[in-house]
C-alpha cells in the first residue's frame, strides 16, 4: 500500500484529502505545517507528498526545497495543492523541485488520476 | 489594459472648492498681513509726503490726489490680485481635499467635527466586520467538519449493513452449496420414485395375475375332488354289490365278503378325504381372496401412484422456488456491490466538496486583512485631523495593492469588475492541473 503525506494548515482540507485517498486504498499521513512535515520525513519517507502553498511559518515552496534535501525524498513526487493560480508562483515551485501544480478545489477523480500518474512505478 | 471608469467624486469636489489645512491658512494669513502692512506704509508715505502741514490742507494738490488714488488702487486691485495669485498657487500644489475647507474658523471647526463624527466609527466598524468574518470562517470550518463526520458515520453504517447482508448471503451461499447436493439427491430420488411407482404398478399387476392363476388352479383341484368323490361313490356301490354276491355264495363267499366290506370302508374314507380336500381348497381360496383383495384393488393402486406422483411434483416446485431464491441472492449481491461503489463515490464527492471551506477561509482572511488596513488608514486620517498633522502626507489608499494579494482568479475577476479593468483573456489562464 502506497503512503501519501499531506501538508496543509487547514484541517478541513486534510480531512477532505485524507478521506478521498484512504477510500482509494492509500495509506495517508498528515501534517499541519512545514516543520511538522519535515519532522515526519525524518522518521519515514512516503511514496508521494502533497503540500499547500500558503501556510503560516514555512510556505510550500520553502518546504519543497527542504524536502529535496532529505535523501529519501530527492526523487519522490511532490505535488503542490493550492488556491494560487499565478504562473510566476508555478515557475517558482517548479524551480524548487515540485512535480506538479494542482489548483483547489479538485474533484476526487482529478486528484486520484494525478496521484496515479505521478506515483512511483507508474 | 486598465482604464478608469469615471473620475472620483473627491477629485471633482477638489476642483470646485479650495481647501486648505491649518498650516496653509496660517502662512496665508501672515502673507496677507504683510501685504496689508506694506499697503498701509506706502499709503502713509504718500499721504505724509504730500500733506501741507502749514496750511492744514488735507488735499493740497494734484500729487496728493494721485497718492490717494494709488492707495485705493493698491487696496482694491493689488491686494485681491495678490490673494488670488496666492490661492492659485496653492491650488496648483494640489493640496488634498480631505483637509479643511477655507472659511471661518468656527465653520471649519464644525466641519472637522462633522467629518470626525462621520468617520469616527468606521475603524471600529472595520474591526467588528473583521471579527464577523472570523466568525463566518469558524462556522464554516465547524460545518465542514460536521459534514465530514456525518458522511463518515453514514458510510460506516452503510458498510455495517452491507457486511450484514454479505454475511447473510455467504451463509445462504453455503446453504446453497449444501442444498445443491441435496437437490441432486432429491432429483435422483424423484427419478427413483418415478421408476419405483412404475415398477410397483407392474409388479402389482403380475401379483394379481399369479394369484388369479393360483385361484384357478385351486378351483380346478376342487373339480378334481368331485371326480374322487364320484369314484368313491361308485366303488361303494360296487362293494355293496360284491357283498350281496358274497352272501349268495355262502361259505365260499365269506372271504370275498370281507374284501367287499374293506373296499366299501375304503371308498367311504376316500369320499371323506375328497370332501376334506375340497373343504381345504375352498378355505384356501376364501383366505387368498380375503387377504389379497386390498392388494388386488385397482383403485388403491391408482391412488398410491397418484399420491406418489403429487409428492414428486411438490418436491419439484420446492426445488424451483429454491433456484429462484438463489437467483435473487445473486442479483442482490450484484446490486449491493454496485451500491457500495456508488456510495463510496458519493462520499468522496462530498469530501471533495468540503474544500469550499478552505477557499472561503482564505478569501475571508484577505477581507479581514484589508479591513484592518482600511481601519488603520482611517485612524491615521482622524489622528492627523485632530493633531493638525499634514493629511497630504498620509497618501492615497492603494486599492490596487489589494489585487497583488489575491491567490484566486475569481478574486481578481471580482476586483477587476469593481475597479473597471478590462476583462482578462481566458486563453492566458494557467491550467488547473499542471505536471512539470
Image (cartoon, rainbow, N blue to C red):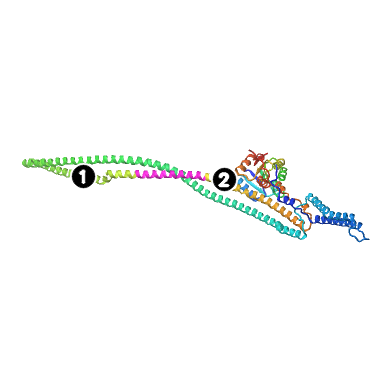
Q: How many numbered dots are placed on residues in this image? A: 2
Depth check, front residue: B174 or A114: A114
Image position, residue B283 (x, y; %): 22, 46
Residue where numbered disc 2 is placed: B345
Q: Secondary structure at mark 1?
A: helix
Image position, residue B172 (x, y; %): 47, 46
Which badge, 1 or 2, is on the more N-terminal residue? 1
Query: Along the horizontal axis of the image, is A56 left or right of B320?
Result: right
Image position, residue A88 (x, y; %): 71, 42
Compared with A11, B227 (above or below) is above
| Quarter of the figure that contains the C terminus of chain B | top right
Reply yes or no: does residue A13 show up in magenta.
no
Specify the farthest residue to the right.
Answer: B54
Which numbered marker is on residue B282? Answer: 1
Chain letter for the residue marked with disc 2 in the picture: B
Q: Which residues are magenta?
A: B309-336
Reply yes or no: does residue B331 show up in magenta.
yes
Which numbered marker is on residue B115? Answer: none
Amino acid at each position: 500500500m502506497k503512503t501519501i503525506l499531506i501538508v496543509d494548515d487547514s484541517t478541513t482540507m486534510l480531512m477532505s484529502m485524507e478521506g478521498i485517498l484512504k477510500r482509494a486504498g492509500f495509506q495517508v499521513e498528515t501534517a499541519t505545517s512545514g516543520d511538522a512535515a519535515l519532522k515526519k520525513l525524518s522518521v519515514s519517507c512516503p511514496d508521494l507528498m502533497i503540500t499547500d502553498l500558503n501556510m503560516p511559518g514555512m510556505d510550500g515552496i520553502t518546504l519543497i526545497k527542504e524536502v529535496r534535501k532529505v535523501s529519501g525524498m530527492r526523487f519522490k513526487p511532490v505535488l503542490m495543492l493550492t488556491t494560487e493560480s499565478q504562473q510566476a508562483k508555478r515557475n517558482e515551485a517548479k524551480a524548487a523541485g515540485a512535480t506538479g501544480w494542482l489548483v483547489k478545489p479538485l474533484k476526487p477523480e482529478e486528484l486520484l488520476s494525478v496521484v496515479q500518474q505521478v506515483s512511483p512505478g507508474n | 489594459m486598465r482604464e478608469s471608469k469615471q473620475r472620483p467624486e473627491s477629485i471633482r469636489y477638489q476642483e470646485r472648492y479650495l481647501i486648505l489645512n491649518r498650516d496653509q491658512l496660517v502662512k496665508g494669513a501672515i502673507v496677507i498681513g504683510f501685504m496689508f502692512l506694506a499697503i498701509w506704509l506706502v499709503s502713509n508715505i504718500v499721504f505724509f509726503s504730500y500733506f501741507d502741514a502749514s496750511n492744514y490742507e488735507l488735499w493740497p494738490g494734484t500729487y496728493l490726489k494721485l497718492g490717494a488714488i494709488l492707495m485705493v488702487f493698491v487696496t482694491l486691485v493689488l491686494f485681491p490680485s495678490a490673494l488670488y495669485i496666492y490661492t492659485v498657487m496653492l491650488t496648483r500644489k494640489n493640496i488634498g481635499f480631505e483637509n479643511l475647507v477655507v472659511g471661518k474658523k468656527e465653520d471649519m471647526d464644525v466641519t472637522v467635527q462633522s467629518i470626525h463624527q462621520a468617520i469616527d466609527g468606521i475603524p471600529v466598524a472595520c474591526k467588528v466586520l473583521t471579527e464577523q468574518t472570523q466568525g463566518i470562517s469558524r462556522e464554516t470550518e465547524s460545518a465542514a467538519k460536521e459534514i465530514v463526520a456525518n458522511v463518515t458515520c453514514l458510510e460506516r453504517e452503510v458498510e455495517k449493513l452491507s457486511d450484514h447482508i454479505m454475511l447473510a448471503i455467504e451463509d445462504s451461499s453455503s446453504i446453497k452449496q449444501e442444498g445443491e447436493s441435496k437437490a441432486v439427491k432429491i432429483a435422483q430420488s424423484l427419478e427413483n420414485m418415478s421408476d419405483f411407482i412404475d415398477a410397483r404398478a407392474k409388479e402389482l399387476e403380475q401379483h394379481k395375475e399369479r394369484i388369479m392363476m393360483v385361484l384357478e388352479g385351486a378351483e380346478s383341484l376342487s373339480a378334481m375332488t368331485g371326480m374322487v368323490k364320484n369314484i368313491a361313490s361308485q366303488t361303494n356301490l360296487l362293494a355293496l354289490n360284491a357283498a350281496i354276491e358274497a352272501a349268495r355264495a355262502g361259505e365260499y363267499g365269506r372271504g370275498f365278503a370281507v374284501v367287499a366290506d374293506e373296499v366299501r370302508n375304503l371308498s367311504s374314507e376316500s369320499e371323506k378325504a375328497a370332501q376334506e380336500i375340497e373343504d381345504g381348497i375352498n378355505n384356501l381360496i376364501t383366505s387368498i381372496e380375503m387377504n389379497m383383495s386390498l392388494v388386488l384393488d385397482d383403485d388403491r393402486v391408482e391412488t398410491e401412484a397418484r399420491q406418489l406422483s403429487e409428492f414428486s411434483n411438490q418436491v419439484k416446485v420446492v426445488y424451483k422456488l429454491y433456484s429462484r431464491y438463489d437467483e435473487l441472492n445473486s442479483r442482490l449481491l450484484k446490486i449491493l456491490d454496485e451500491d457500495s461503489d456508488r456510495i463510496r463515490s458519493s462520499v468522496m464527492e462530498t469530501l471533495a466538496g468540503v474544500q469550499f471551506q478552505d477557499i472561503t477561509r482564505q478569501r475571508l482572511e484577505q477581507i479581514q486583512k484589508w479591513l484592518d488596513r482600511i481601519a488603520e488608514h482611517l485612524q491615521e486620517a482622524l489622528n492627523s485631523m485632530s493633531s493638525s498633522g499634514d493629511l497630504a502626507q498620509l497618501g492615497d489608499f492603494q486599492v490596487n495593492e489589494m489585487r497583488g494579494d489575491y491567490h484566486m482568479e475569481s478574486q481578481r475577476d471580482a476586483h477587476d469588475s469593481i475597479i473597471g479593468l478590462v476583462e482578462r483573456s481566458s486563453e492566458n489562464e494557467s491550467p488547473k492541473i499542471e505536471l512539470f
